[in-house]
Amino acid sequence: MFDTLSDRLAGVFDKLRGRGALTDADVRSAMREVRVALLEADVALPVARDFVDQVTEQAVGQDVLRSITPGQMVVKIVHDALVEMLGSEAAELLVDGNPPAVVMMVGLQGSGKTTTTAKLAKRLSERDRKRVLMASLDVARPAAQEQLAVLGRQTNVDTLPVVAGQQPVEIARRAIQAARLQAYDVVLLDTAGRLHVDDALMGEMKAVAEASRPTETLLVVDSLTGQDAINVAKGFSAEVDLTGVILTRMDGDARGGAALSMRAVTGKPIKFAGVGEGLEALEAFHPSRVAGRILGMGDVVSLVERAAETIQVEDAEKLAAKMAKGKFDLDDLRMQIGQMQRMGGLGALASMMPGLKGVKGAMEQAQDGKALVHLEAMMSSMTAKERSRPELINAKRKIRIAKGSGTSVQEVNKLLKMHQEMANAMKRLKKMGGLGKLAAMFGKGGLEGALGGMAPGALPPGGLGGGGSALPGLGGGSAFNLPPGFDKFSKK
């Protein structure tokens, strides 16, 4: 997400950083380029104009121009202004009051409202340990109620049984009554959409809101529609008492104009962002983290959170114990590749790592070439004995592995070389004092100690590893300090 804007801004700020001293004219010229970049990213004109004026006013001050690192100071000012534009603080979902809390989902047809309802239900159920009941109020779209029921089964979240002939207001009342009787914490009301904002839709939304008294009314909009998403948000906010916005398909939005304009235009916070098709692909929207990603500073906190959600603790502990002894076999490599896939692949990881924005393209190219899939296939074609003792793999076995995985002997050799380099790294780590020494760099503060004081673009020595420190199971440089030749797996 934001790739186009991020690349444009990176070019502007690289020029500023490359100069020892900045003049007033240098800053104003850079800000003109920033304004063009924002407009090309489909940011609303008034928002782009106000943003550039605010940044320019601060950036031409004497404190910046006389700073030792004026280029870095300008980047910091832009970062802070982006955070303010996006909403400053992350907006929490208010569902902890007197149960059941009612969350009403509104939006146009095709915006992903029903799927987003299921994603939010899954998040509330698994992360917040809430008992959630979903109810479809969409009686106009064919099979809309059945769709939500199917998604409920996939997410293990209860849905209100369908009663033929009931209208949206009746369904809402029945859902709230059922939630009270059966001690549900949250009720999600998936309302009907239209192809455009019209009086009938708004009348229905108002009637449902009056009957259900929702604690949250969330507008679901497709970020890929750019300015149209902003117009839809303005239309809904004028008629319905919105409390927040959920942007869908953010992972496919290279421009990001909707996200950057939404808060400024509507005054409503962006609470969540859909970042994939999977039902787990819904992230809380953190303005400071998003600003960091746009400016290439990474998003280590989100990376750690994603790691905590996807990495199996038992596997990480086993790997840490083996690494402490200087051991690392192909089963361990296979485990780490699986972890990388669950965390979104190489491109997703690179976009969150400070200083790795520049290599994201190469990583995504490798991933597009099925690099991780090839590695997994080769290791699956090996016997358990071969994976635990790679030195047994002779020329004859390599041919068998290559045929079984649909790859070549050269690729098998690259895999074995990668493993050998990692195994050697584990042995060197053991000689240096083991994982305890490596983890010590994070201090006594645990995760806070790992992240505290990190400058934008900087990483702690040795990466974010440690087999059980900040990122369990991603230690020893194996996940992020990729060995030479890894990106060539996509090329046969």
Image (cartoon, rainbow, N blue to C red):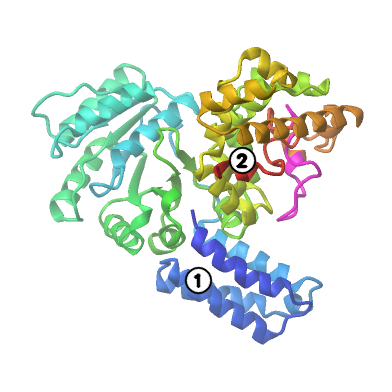
Specify the quadrant of the image occupied by residue 6: bottom right
How far from the left and from the top, in percent, is residue 301? 63, 42
Vertical placement of 192 versus 439: above or below?
below
Residue with the mark numbered 2? 303
Name the residue rendered at 37%, 21% in the picture.
156
Cβ atoms at labels 2 and 1 below 8 Å apart: no
- The dot on residue 37 is 1
Residues 232 and 183: in front is 232
Q: Secondary structure at mark 2?
A: helix
Vertical placement of 217 versus 406: above or below?
below
Magenta segment's dominant SS is: loop
The quadrant the C terminus occupies is top right
Residues 402 and 101: in front is 402
How far from the left and from the top, in percent, is residue 423? 78, 28
Residues 402 and 382: in front is 402
Asked if residue 235 lies left or right of residue 427, the reply is left
How far from the left and from the top, in percent, is residue 344? 53, 38
Residues 296 and 478: in front is 478
**455 falls in the magenta region:** yes
Residue type at mark 1 is: Ala
- Crowding around mark 2 (Cα neighbors within 10 Å: few <14, some 14 to 19, many 20+) is some
- Tell me which segment is drawn in magenta: 450-469
Per the model, the C-alpha gap separating discs 2 and 1 is: 27 Å
Name the residue rendered at 64%, 37% in the picture.
304
Of callouts 2 and 1, the N-terminal one: 1
**231 falls in the magenta region:** no
Name the residue rendered at 72%, 34% in the picture.
417
How far from the left and from the top, in percent, is residue 372? 56, 35
Regarding residue 75, the answer to whether it shows in the image is yes
Specify the quadrant of the image occupied by residue 410: top right
Name the residue rendered at 32%, 33% in the picture.
188
Residue type at mark 2 is: Leu
